[in-house]
Image: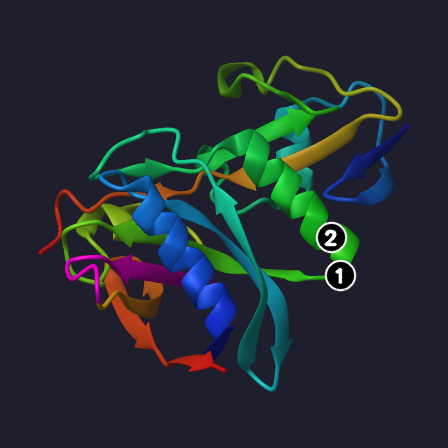
Amino acid sequence: MIIISKDDFYKIVDRALSELPNEACGLIAGRIEENNKIIEKVYLLNNIDKSNEHFSLDPKEQLAAVRDMREQGLSPLGNWHSHPSSPSRPSEEDKRLAYDKTASYLILSLMDKDKPVLNSFHIDGDKAELEELVIKE
Amino acid sequence: MKITVAGETKDFNEGLTIAELIKQENVENPDYITVSVNDEFADNENFSSIELHDGDVVEFLYFMGGGSYDIL
């Protein structure tokens, strides 16, 4: 299970909406307790592809985020990105570029902008498995 | 010489290249990493020729990306 606060959920939603029509992206960090991942910080990074159908994290921002996690004693948990007009599930490209099978890959669908859908996945090769995601008050 | 790798300072032999460091650190999927040395990103094609020096700070970053263009 992965747990995200309502505030962090809306932080992702707001960022993704503000980046439309392009995909938005970032990192998630926190702690792991009894096999549950608890997100404590969401990082909003720039999509250097500036595309509505592809994203790449900015390596400089990624480096700064990794150092921030280290300083704050947070564990890297995975990343997040938005699908502006497609469902909340990994594309073939998402699977190809998912190198860490222990990471959580959060995908926010904005197909219905009034009802954004966030799901989390574990990806191992061409297999993507839905991870239970809880949005906590 | 001492090099800080991913926040941890360790001893290495003189003349160590980035490519050798990647092997020694057992970095998984090395084809997909970006390496920064003292906050400067190294050219992947030169990993075998770039020598590290005492006091260098090295970070390994995995490329992270994806795309929705080929969603099934």
When the figure is inspected, residue A3 is found, relative to residue B25, above or below; the finding is: below
Front residue (pair B15, B70): B70
Q: Is residue A1 visible?
A: no
Verify whether residue A69 appears in magenta.
no
Task: Please tell me whether mark 1 sits on a helix, a strand or a loop.
Answer: loop
In the image, which residues are magenta? Answer: A101-114
x and y percentages locating residue B54 in the rendered image:
88, 23
x and y percentages locating residue B18 in the rendered image:
66, 25
**Splitting the image into 4 quarters, where does residue A40 fall?**
bottom right
Residue lying farthest to the left in this orientation = B72
Q: Which residue is mark 1?
A: A73
Front residue (pair A54, B48): A54
Which residue lies at the image location 37% right of the left edge and 62% below the top edge?
A: A106
Which residue lies at the image location 22% right of the left edge and 68% below the top edge?
A: A115
Which residue lies at the image location 81% right of the left edge and 37% below the top edge?
A: B4
Amino acid tagged 2: Arg
Front residue (pair A40, B34): A40
Q: How many marks?
A: 2
x and y percentages locating residue A16 in the rendered image:
34, 50
Q: Is residue A89 visible?
A: yes
x and y percentages locating residue B27 in the rendered image:
58, 44
Q: Is residue A35 left or right of residue B72?
A: right
> In the image, which disc is placed on residue A70?
2
